[in-house]
Image: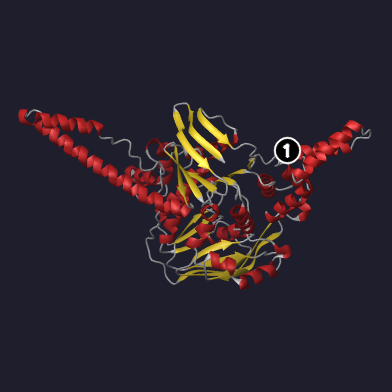
């Protein structure tokens, strides 16, 4: 159990946390949520002792072991993956290494024998005999092949290193588990495995994640960081969201009533302060007004951008027909005789392992690249706007955000462009920042603004949720659900796909049989469909897992 009492932390004049009081108990999973910059990762670092707090106390039950998901992916380069996992239990790992060192001695003394006996007892008590098997099970559950278990970390790619470090945090049944964005880099089956692991985990879990589906699956409680406070809620993310909307409406209503009361008091004071017969009442009302707190009714510090796509023209029945597209890159076939017909009303999510094939298809149908052969024909009533995964080329200038967006606006009036940017959270001086210094999330909001101004009836989006916080993802999600036109997109966000798409297309490995799996259904239904599972089993070797 962890108890947080009167915790405060500030940086300069900014107070990040103030008088935070929380209790984290075993058997629960706590999701830490909040706007970007609210201090989610910082709070985990305070709990782990990596960052010192200014005031307050953090109490951890005696003899409780805490495990933390490491963020340095290059810290264990010289160690095999399976040994890196065991290092997640420092006491066991220390006993194991000392035991190995003693047995490796050529001159084994009586003193060594006594120490070895002590170590053997400790090794057994700490579960040392089962350690390698348990570490292997964790690695396999997270999608690493058995041959990767003995490889050095330096030999593994980035996605596999992330999984090893996650297995390291999970290893040895820690009493307290701190996880910062644990689903990053995981495929769907590994995420599902992790969800099941955490649901069954008997101890305390505290997790930061932008994955709404994951938070809904594993969290028993949510801790919301807002205005420097951390407010606990029972239930998962969806329950918190519904509750927060109710509380925000209540707070707005309360503030409105106070403002109306203040206006009424001011009018009475102004009218009767010089009237002798009403002077006492005016003085009384002045005291009431002074006590009326209009500042301390916070609604939320969260800011949701406005995302709304309004097509200028209704789309016709003929949308897009792509016939026998062929495209290769560096000798690898990304598209092989690939055909696609898009119909009115389609909202298509492209899923699967072939990420470069998905991007290549989007580039070709948008005219950014040319296919080696094949035809792309758009319907006469269609107009499209494109969100490419790699968008840095759009921001290689020192134009201000206002002048940058004005390039794509029919209405050139600065007031119009500034008001549009304000809805996308670029208000005041923010709208004057040069675009070449923008963060990843800011660039995404700019690209979405560009698409909204285009008023097209087809939207093509290649991983638009990258770099966005939960608020922006929710706003984009709602905007695409409400969009009356056609959407072609891909994303790593399970909830995003499931709530938007009515058609799922999985591009299969093109260098072999080519083709795709195409189903008119929601994503959750696609994942459960027996026919889809059979087709995937035939298309992929070694039981490759579905990634989105």
Left of 280 or right of it: where is 304?
Answer: right
Judge whether 420 appears above or below 371 on screen: above
Residue 350 placement (x, y as % from top left): 56, 62
Task: Answer with the quarter of the image where residue 523 lies.
Answer: bottom right
- In depth, the one of 266 and 290 nearer the eye is 290
Judge whether 55 appears above or below 477 on screen: above
Judge whether 65 appears above or below 367 on screen: above
The answer to whether residue 447 is visible is no
Judge whether 196 appears above or below 275 on screen: below
User: Which quadrant is home to the C terminus?
Assistant: bottom right
Colour option used:
secondary structure
The answer to whether residue 289 is visible is yes
Left of 334 or right of it: where is 440?
Answer: left
Residue 139 placement (x, y as % from top left): 71, 52
Residue 51 placement (x, y as % from top left): 57, 31
Residue drawn at the location 82% of the way across and 41% of the way down: 120
Residue drawn at the location 31% of the way across and 35% of the way down: 295
Left of 151 or right of it: where is 168?
Answer: left
Q: Which residue is mark 1?
A: 91
Farthest residue in the right direction? 107
Residue 243 placement (x, y as % from top left): 40, 51
């Amino acid at each position: 159990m962890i108890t947080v009492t009167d915790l405060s932390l500030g940086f300069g004049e900014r107070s990040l946390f103030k008088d935070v009081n929380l209790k984290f108990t075993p058997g629960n999973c706590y999701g830490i949520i909040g706007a970007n910059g609210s201090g989610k990762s910082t709070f985990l670092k305070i709990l782990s002792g990596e960052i010192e707090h200014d005031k307050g106390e953090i109490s951890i039950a005696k003899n409780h072991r805490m495990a933390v998901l490491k963020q340095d992916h290059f810290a264990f380069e010289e160690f095999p993956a399976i040994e890196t996992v065991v290092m997640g239990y420092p006491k066991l790992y220390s006993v194991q290494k000392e035991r190995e060192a003693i047995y490796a001695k050529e001159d084994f003394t009586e003193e060594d024998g006594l120490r070895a006996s002590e170590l053997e007892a400790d090794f057994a008590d700490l579960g040392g005999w089962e350690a390698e098997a348990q570490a292997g099970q964790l690695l396999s559950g997270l999608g690493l092949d058995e041959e990767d278990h003995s490889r050095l970390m330096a030999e593994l790619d980035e996605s596999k290193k992330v999984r090893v470090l996650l297995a390291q945090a999970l290893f040895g049944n820690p009493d307290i588990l701190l996880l910062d964005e644990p689903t990053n880099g995981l495929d769907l089956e590994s995420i599902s495995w992790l969800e099941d692991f955490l649901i069954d985990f008997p101890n305390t879990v505290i997790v930061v994640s932008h994955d709404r589906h994951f938070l809904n699956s594993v969290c028993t409680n949510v801790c919301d960081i807002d205005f420097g406070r951390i407010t606990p809620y029972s239930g998962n993310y969806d329950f918190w969201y519904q509750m927060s909307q109710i509380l925000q409406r209540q707070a707005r209503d309360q503030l409105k009533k106070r403002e109306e009361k203040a206006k009424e008091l001011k009018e009475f004071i102004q009218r009767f302060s010089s009237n002798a017969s009403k002077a006492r009442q005016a003085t009384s009302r002045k005291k009431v007004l002074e006590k009326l707190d209009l500042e301390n009714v916070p609604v939320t510090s969260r800011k949701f951008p406005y995302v709304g796509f309004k097509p200028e023209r209704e789309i016709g029945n003929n949308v897009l027909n792509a016939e026998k597209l062929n495209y290769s890159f560096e000798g690898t076939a990304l598209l092989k005789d690939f055909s696609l017909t898009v119909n009115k009303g389609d909202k298509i999510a492209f899923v699967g392992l072939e990420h470069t094939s998905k991007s290549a298809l989007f580039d070709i149908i948008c005219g950014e690249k040319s296919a080696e052969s094949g035809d792309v024909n758009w319907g006469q009533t269609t107009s499209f706007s494109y969100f490419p995964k790699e968008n840095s080329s759009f921001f290689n200038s020192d134009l201000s955000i206002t002048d940058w967006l004005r390039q794509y606006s029919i209405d050139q009036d600065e007031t119009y462009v500034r008001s549009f940017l304000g809805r996308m959270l670029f208000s005041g001086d923010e709208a004057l920042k040069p675009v070449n210094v923008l963060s990843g999330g800011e660039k995404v909001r700019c690209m979405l603004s560009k698409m909204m101004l285009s008023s097209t009836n087809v939207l093509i989006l290649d991983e638009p949720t990258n770099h966005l916080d939960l608020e922006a993802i929710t706003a984009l999600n709602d905007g695409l659900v409400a969009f009356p036109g056609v959407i072609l997109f891909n994303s790593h966000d399970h909830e995003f796909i499931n709530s938007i798409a009515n058609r799922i297309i999985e591009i299969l490995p093109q260098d072999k049989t080519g083709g795709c799996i195409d189903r008119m259904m929601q994503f959750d239904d696609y994942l459960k469909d027996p026919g889809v599972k059979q087709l995937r089993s035939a298309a992929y070797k070694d039981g490759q897992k579905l990634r989105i």
